[in-house]
Amino acid sequence: MPRRGPLPPWTLVVLLQLVLVSSQVAGCLLSPCLEYLGTAAFYGLTSLKKLVLVETNITSLSDLPIGHLHTLQELNLGHNSIASLKLPKYFTNLTSLRHLSFLSNKITYISKGDLGVLGDVNRLNLTLVLSLNDIKCIEPGSFAGIHLGELVLRSSFANYSVMQKSLQGLTGLQVNRLIVGEFSNSQRLEDFQSGLLSGLCQVQMQEFVLICFRDFERDTDTLFNCIGNVSSIRLVNLELKEVSEVPMFSQVKQLECKTCKFKEVPAVKLSLFKELRVLRITKSKHLNSFRQKFESLSNLEVIDLSENRLSFTGCCSPQFRECPNLKHLNLSFNSDISVTGDFTNCHARITVKVVATFSKD
């Protein structure tokens, strides 16, 4: 039976999550009420891990009384009117913070020193979300010396020139994962243009994600120029019809192309990624042919070609003749594939996964 009535006075209550969103409560709209948060508003919440202040009409971080929340792991400030990314000194006390979201605010300029407090402590696990702001300029040096787990910039720039110049302001950043691109329902930049990512040459990152660009008809030869030394690259929901030029001595070990517009498995171009270990090309309704052969990919161990519309017979010895260490091959959920079982020159034991399904129109 659930307890009815008040809890006994000796009961210990620990609040781990607090969500405040715009709503009508007792005739008072919550969002303007938050303008008068006192210094003791969150007093006593010493174990709070998640604080959501979405659509609460916050305009500034300076008076937010959260500097004592040492256990706070997630702070969601999305859909407010915050215009400055200047992080107050009290952020140095939030040593457990893992997720900081400024999604859909009014941040237009990021200046040198705004993120200075993040450089004072190790933030290798922190995700910083700046998507759906109207960023016009990131001052060079703003991210210098900053270490982040993840930085998300989606639908953050009005046009090509603003995005290209702003990405140059990321110089000196060290980040495990950088996500750049658009949202499918809020695309401000529809086409990828030559040199768009040139500002990333001075950014140290382990993984790069480019998401939601429509037009890749031309000017794609510079796509990999500044990300060729990244360990992992994910290309998601791009109308990319062919692989860009691959820089010499590329260090890419994992490459994923999800929901792109390849019609043919681009094995020849992909073979230029000599350090490639994992390759995934999935969820493309346009991909129906696999005639090219992979060449001299001695490190390649995993290939996932599932959920496409591939149709071919005699798989797969010819295509992988020069992939001696291939161990896993996923051909599931395609149109019509026959596997011969002959994997000449594949010295490692190989696992082939083929799940037959009906092709979808």
Image (cartoon, rainbow, N blue to C red):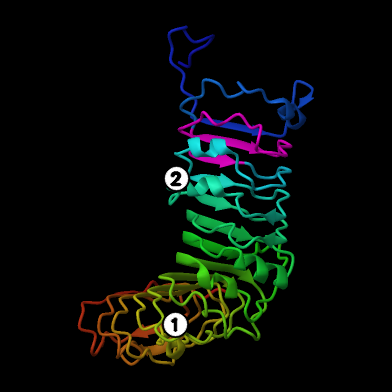
**Foreground disc of the pair 2, 1:** 2
Horizontal side of 176 relative to 89 (left or right) equals left
Residues in magenta, as a range: 49-76
Q: What is the three-letter code of the residue carrying label 1?
A: Asp
Residue 207 drawn in magenta: no
Image height of 267 relative to 49, above or below: below
Residue 349 visible in the current orientation: yes
Q: Residue furthest right?
A: 27
The x, y position of residue 302, in whole percent, is 33, 74
The image quadrant that residue 28 belongs to is top right
Looking at the picture, tell me which residue is in the foreground, 288 or 59. Answer: 59
Crowd band around label 1 with a 10 angstrom C-alpha radius: few (<14), some (14–19), many (20+): some
**Which residue: 48% across, 72% down?**
307
Specify the amino acid type for callout 2.
Val
**Residue 185 visible in the current orientation:** no
At x 43% / y 91%, what residue is drawn? 268
Q: Which mark is residue 194?
A: none
The tag on residue 121 is 2
Front-lying residue, 120 or 15? 120
State the residue position of label 1.
Answer: 336
